[in-house]
């Protein structure tokens, strides 16, 4: 396998048309024209969409996780149905339903334009995935922690708030950070909602620039920007995972 891989890379290096590749994917003039808007507008919008969707998803996920662990059956049924529904639907379908379906069916108008619709759509999906992560984190806390808190006179809700959840979140920080990385990339789906020049995220910005110049360099530039945003987060996840493993040992 190593030999095949080396042969493929060597063949690409020696036989690729580097002049054509450079002209179509690494045109410095086009890359320069994208500045500074690719950073000050598109990257900023991507981060705003991600932050709002993550905040909404985290709150929703916490509620759903507690409902799924509840002793009240209807709470468990509702949480399970929600999680299975939004984990089963493609994120793009959810975004379209939020952006257009609710307005057509019920006459609802979501404030904030693309920002409100996109953040809500992504947040609903993220909440379903993060709910299972939070539930697993709560269940990973030793049962004796709750029993000890109850023996000290704490109510179940107080024990959950001050004893169980802080320990659970310490365990699940790495997978939650991974979810944030996925949300950053999922913002590329928001083009279906329609955008204004001021609300374009990175992928939509690159597509419009590519259509305008008939060149793929904008994709290369945006790919680099995505990596600048996501690589520090993935590095943080690895550090947190190693720290968690070290504490377990």
Image (spheres, rainbow, N blue to C red):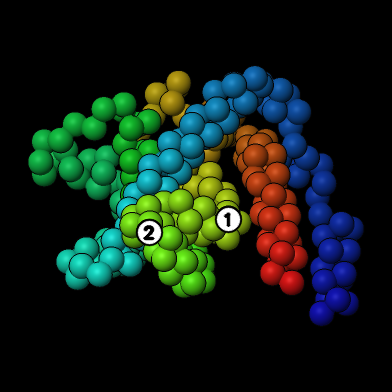
Viewer can see residue 92: no
Expressed as whole percent of the image width and height from the top left, the position of residue 46 reads 52, 34
Expressed as whole percent of the image width and height from the top left, the position of residue 132 reads 42, 64
Looking at the picture, does residue 35 appear above or below residue 156? above
Q: Quadrant of the C terminus?
A: bottom right
Please name the residue that numbered disc 1 is placed on: 170
Viewer can see residue 199: yes
Which type of secondary structure does the marked residue at label 1 adopt?
helix
Near-viewer residue (150 or 232) = 150
Foreground: disc 2 or disc 1: 2
Looking at the picture, does residue 134 appear above or below residue 223? below
Looking at the picture, does residue 1 appear above or below residue 72? below
Residue, x 38% and y 42% (percent of image)?
Answer: 56
Expressed as whole percent of the image width and height from the top left, the position of residue 159 reads 41, 57
10 Å neighbourhood of mark 2: few (<14), some, or many (≥20)?
A: few
Please name the residue that numbered disc 2 is placed on: 153
Near-viewer residue (45 or 32) = 45
Expressed as whole percent of the image width and height from the top left, the position of residue 161 reads 41, 51
Is residue 222 toward the left or the right of residue 103 in the image?
A: right
Which of the two labelled residues, at mark 2 and mark 1, occupies the earlier sequence position?
Answer: 2
Near-viewer residue (135 or 144) = 144
């Amino acid at each position: 396998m190593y030999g095949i891989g080396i042969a493929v890379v060597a063949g690409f290096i020696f036989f690729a048309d580097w002049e054509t590749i450079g002209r179509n994917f690494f045109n410095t003039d086009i890359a320069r024209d994208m500045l500074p808007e690719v950073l000050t507008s598109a990257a900023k919008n991507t981060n705003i969409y991600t932050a709002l969707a993550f905040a909404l998803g985290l709150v929703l996920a916490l509620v759903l996780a507690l409902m799924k662990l509840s002793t009240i059956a209807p709470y468990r049924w509702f949480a399970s149905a929600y999680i299975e529904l939004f984990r089963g639907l493609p994120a793009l379908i959810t975004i379209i339903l939020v952006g257009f379906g609710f307005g057509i069916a019920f006459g609802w108008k979501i404030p904030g334009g693309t920002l409100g619709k996109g953040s809500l759509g992504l947040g609903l999906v993220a909440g379903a995935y993060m709910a299972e992560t939070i539930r697993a984190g709560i269940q990973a806390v030793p049962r004796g922690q709750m029993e000890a808190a109850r023996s000290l006179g704490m109510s179940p809700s107080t024990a959950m708030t001050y004893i169980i959840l802080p320990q659970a979140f310490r365990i699940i920080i790495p997978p939650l950070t991974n979810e944030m990385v996925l949300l950053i990339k999922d913002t590329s789906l928001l083009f279906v909602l329609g955008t204004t020049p001021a609300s374009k995220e990175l992928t939509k910005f690159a597509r419009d620039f590519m259509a305008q110049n008939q060149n793929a360099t904008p994709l290369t530039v945006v790919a680099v920007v995505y990596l600048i945003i996501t690589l520090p987060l993935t590095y943080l996840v690895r550090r947190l995972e190693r720290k968690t493993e070290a504490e377990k040992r």
